[in-house]
Image (tube, coloured by chain):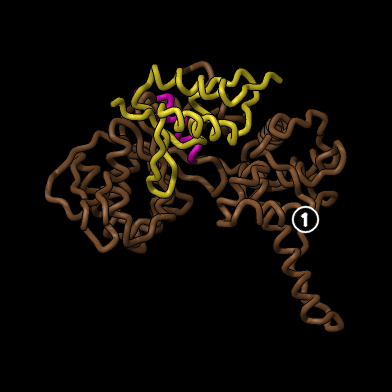
Amino acid sequence: MPCMSIEQIAQAIEVHLRVNPHAKDTAEGIHLWWIDWQGAPESVTLTQAALELLETQGIMVCVVAGRRELWSAAPRT
Amino acid sequence: MESFPLSNLIGSSTQFQQVRKQIKKIASVDVAAFISGETGSGKELVVRAIHYLSERRSQPFVPVNCGALPETLVESELFGHERGAFTDAKQGAIGLIAEADGGSLFLDEIDALSLKAQAVLLRFLQDGTYRRVGGTVTRQAHVRVIAASNACLEQLVETRQFRRDLLYRLNILNLRLPALREREGDAMELAHVFLQRLCKTYKTPDRHFHPDALAYVKSHTWPGNVRELENTIHREFLMSDDSWVRLGSVATVEEPVRAPLPETGFRTAKTQAIAEFEREYLLSLLARTEGNISSAARIAGQDRSAFARLVRKHGLTKDRSTG
């Protein structure tokens, strides 16, 4: 049962965004479809933490739309 | 993307294999689609699979629960609004259609849309153009709309609660998700996957299903479908004091709220009822947030430290937000 750290999950999300810069989804969607877990996935709370980490680093932004949080790449300045 | 997406769709039954085939087919063509299925049967999971297997996979996926949007705001939520369009519109908003531009917009519980909102949506589906509420500029968005409902839309059409033309427009392709009870053997397969995930999440690899639990998984009809199965296993996983996860008659039985005995004083009975409510509420919330107290406190609208005190009071201390 290999475990991924929050930093490793954040890195996987970043890789996905590099290839798909227009991608956008909720934390649940990102958890299931952007990260190749190579086995049983980690908890979605770790993906949420990874997204928040990327937000503090200015790599991702979160908007609330239709009462759901949507995550996407931060616009380049 | 082909290597792992379908691994999120668990189930080997012939009924579910058929669903997988249909997902691939629907993903291969870029038109509106309609997904029907009982509550908890996994409609959002299936629609996401359609998006991520389609040509739009690198674009946004925007899920919306139409039933959760206040009727008065549906139009502005979908199409956006200009600043000052209505009393609370202190800032402009681009709306869900614009958020989903280039990708897929998933409209769950489409039957909850008012007839007025249905008319506006129909107009957008016809030519891909729309106006923000309070705006004069006609805008265009290239969005694939996939709708879902657990209601029978044909029936709603007959009773004039749903527009026939909108149904035709959405129903170009359709997929009916089978209920879990119709998917032979899938409940057992899903149960093992959920338990495996929980063992990983809570770092307790030594938990197993009690033999009676497996019999229960097989025999129960799961009216709440996959969601009910997942939540039940999660709750009993958290409640287990040993290495066994019990379900059914040997599990934690949810007692209905009992009328207080006349000999119990009002204050005592009230305190007991509140304690029971608190415990049930916390258990269900912690199951939803996978034991994360910060998230649970946010959802409950409570201060984290006060919420954590309450969790400790009920002996439910398995916080995942700090570990």
Comparing A17 with B233, the one in front is A17
Tell me the element at label 1.
loop
Determine which quarter of the picture holds residue B116: bottom left
Q: What residue is drawn where x is 48% and y is 17%?
A: B2
Task: State which region is magenta.
Answer: B44-55
Residue B49 is covered by the magenta coloring: yes
Residue B275 is covered by the magenta coloring: no
Hue used for the chain lettered B: brown
- Which x, y percent locates residue B21? 48, 26
Give the prevailing secondary structure in the magenta stretch: helix
Measured along the vertical axis of the image, is residue B308 above or below residue B51? below
Hue used for the chain lettered A: yellow
Q: What residue is drawn where x is 28% and y is 54%?
A: B75
Comparing A55 with B243, the one in front is A55
Tag 1: residue type? His
Measured along the vertical axis of the image, is residue B136 above or below residue B15? below
- Can residue B28 be seen from the camera position used here? no
Q: What residue is drawn where x is 32% and y is 55%?
A: B74
- Location of mark 1 (residue): B314
